[in-house]
Structure formats: C-alpha cells, structure tokens
Image (spheres, grey):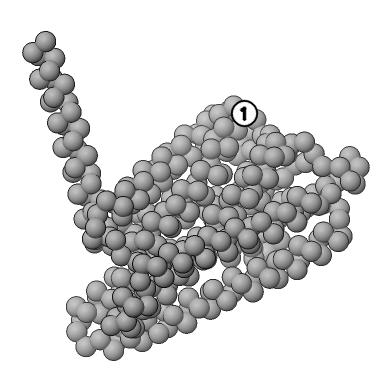
Amino acid sequence: MSNSSSPTQFLLLAFADRRELQLLHFWLFLAISLAALLANGLILSAVACDHHLHTPMGFFLLNLSLTDLGCICTTVPKAMHNSLWDTTTISYKGCAAQLFFFYFFISAEYFLLTIMCYDRYVAICKPLHYGTLLGSRTCAHMAAAAWAAGFLHTLLHTANTFSLPLCQGNALGQFFCEIPAIHKLSCSHSGYLREIGLIVFSVCLEFSCFIFIVFSYVQIFRAVLRIPCEQGRHKAFSMCLPHLAVVSLFVSTGIFSDLKPPSISSPSLDLVVAVLYSVVPPALNPLIYSLRNQELKDAVRKMIRFLHFSSLNVVNTEIYSSSHT
C-alpha cells in the first residue's frame, strides 16, 4: 500500500476465535443493549410525560439519556453483527461514521455532566436563585452549547484523522473505530503534529471541565456540612450522589483507557478497557439515576403501572369483542 493511499475497509478486533465464544459475546451485547435501550427509553418517557420532572435536572437528564443511547447504538450493533456473522470488517465510510458519532456523543455527555454539576451547585449553594439562574431558556442554551461543543470537538478530530495517509495496513486492533487505533496506521508526520495540537487543546478543555466539577463539589460539600439538620444533609447528599457516581464512572474509565501503562497493554486488555469506557457507563447511568432519584423512580413506576393496565385493557377488550362475534 502506498503512502498516499487509504484502505477501502478496516479490520476490527474479534472478541474470540471460537464460534461458541463469539455467539456468547453476541448474546451478552444483545442483553446489555436491550437493557440500556429499555432503561434510557423509560427515563426519556418519564421525563417527557411527568410534569414533576419538568425541571432543569430532568431536562439535562433527558439529554444525558440521549447521549447514552447514542453511544450504545453507535458501537454495539456492529460488534454484535461481527460476532454473529463471524466477520471483522467495517467499510471506510462506516468506520468514519462510527468514529464521528461515538466521539460526538461521548464529548456531548462530558459537557452535559459538567453542566449538570452546575445545576447541583446552584440547587444546594444558591437555592433562592435557582429559578433565576436556571430558567428554561438558560437550560436550553446550555444544553445546545454542550451539543455544539461536542459536535465541533469531534468534527476537528474526525477531519484530521481521516485526512491522514494510512500505510501501516488496515487492522485496527479494537472492536470499534477509535482515533488512537487509526493513528497507529498513519505514516504522516505533519498529520501527527496536527493531532498532537488537537489533543493538547482537548486535554485543556476536558481538564477545565474536570476542575470545574471538582471545585463545584468542594463548594457543595461545604454547604451541605453547614446544614444543621441531619435530614437536610441526607436530602442534599441524595441530590448529588447520582451525578457524582455517573461522573466518577465516566471519568475513571476514560482516564484508565488513556493513561494505562504501555507495559501492561495487550489486545485482550485493550478490548476489556474499551468495553469499560464505551459500553458500561451508558448502560449503568440509567440504573444509577433510577436507584438514587426518588422522583424519577416514582415516575417510572407510574409509567410501568400505566402501561401494564393499558395492555390489560387491550387484552380484555379483544377477549370481549371476540366472545361477542
């Protein structure tokens, strides 16, 4: 392959060589994706239908569920297809689309988590100004800014990555298309320097968000510890714990993926780490929020009860109509 050429397709890393294990991975991913789709779908429906959840946190939680669904639907279906049909290929355009959408959703999620931290800060540290600082228009602008920042951030990385000439084969060594795997196939020094500049910019942006989150939670915990009533402290902590748990899961898996020592790197470990940061957080986020947020739990229970009674009414109607025909 010449230095100026690009492959027409890439080879993804298979989860296993044995057919039985490939089918096991297919069913495992199917179960994870269905659980994530169901849980995030319930959250989306609950927030949209229950007026008690028409709050800034409910609005941001709706956006977070959209990013979780996007992450799952971008990487898992192709992995399931490859495991089921015993193949490892993905087209060049398919790889570019997968890379773009995955990093778009993951970037937007990080910015949304930062905004949600500000929501918790205002709710606990400045409760009297909550309605003023987080009005509906302000929340819409903040969410739009998170999506736009994720889009521009991803567009820059994707455009630079797929402008590189690839001369090191077409085996990515990962179960989905990610930027570091494609850079390993590049032979362009100038493109590498451009990507270094983009990485430095991204690290500065992400680190700024991380510092903001840490600073906000320091202020939040100070305010909570000053609350004289134990019940009030418990309520304030319960407001923050779901968000803090989601941020911790998101950041810890991402940091371990980026900063793990090369000495312990191996194809199997890289595969496990990739699943940890690309599949596990979107699947667990709805569970974390639904377990800790009482209003959300009540709304989901109400919706499940309504769907159950609706289905029973439909069945009873069909039985009644069939018995009278």
Residue at position x 82%, y 42% in the image: 6
Query: Disc 1 designates what residue?
Result: 86
Which element carries disc 1, helix, strand or loop? loop
Q: Which amino acid type is marked by label 1? A: Asp
Q: Is residue 85 left or right of residue 243?
A: right
Q: Residues within 10 Å of mark 1 (few under 14, many from 20)?
A: some
Residue 318 pos. (x, y %) = 16, 21
Residue 191 pos. (x, y %) = 82, 59
Q: Is residue 202 left or right of residue 249?
A: right
The answer to whether 288 is drawn above or below residue 71 in the figure is below
Q: Quadrant of the N terminus?
A: top right
Residue 13 pos. (x, y %) = 66, 41
Residue 292 appears in the figure: no
Residue at position x 34%, y 78% in the image: 132
Residue 18 pos. (x, y %) = 60, 30
Q: Nearer the viewer, residue 36 or 29?
A: 36
The answer to whether 101 is drawn above or below residue 13 in the figure is below
Residue 159 in which image quadrant:
bottom right
Q: Nearer the viewer, residue 313 or 258?
A: 313
Q: Is residue 80 left or right of residue 297?
A: right
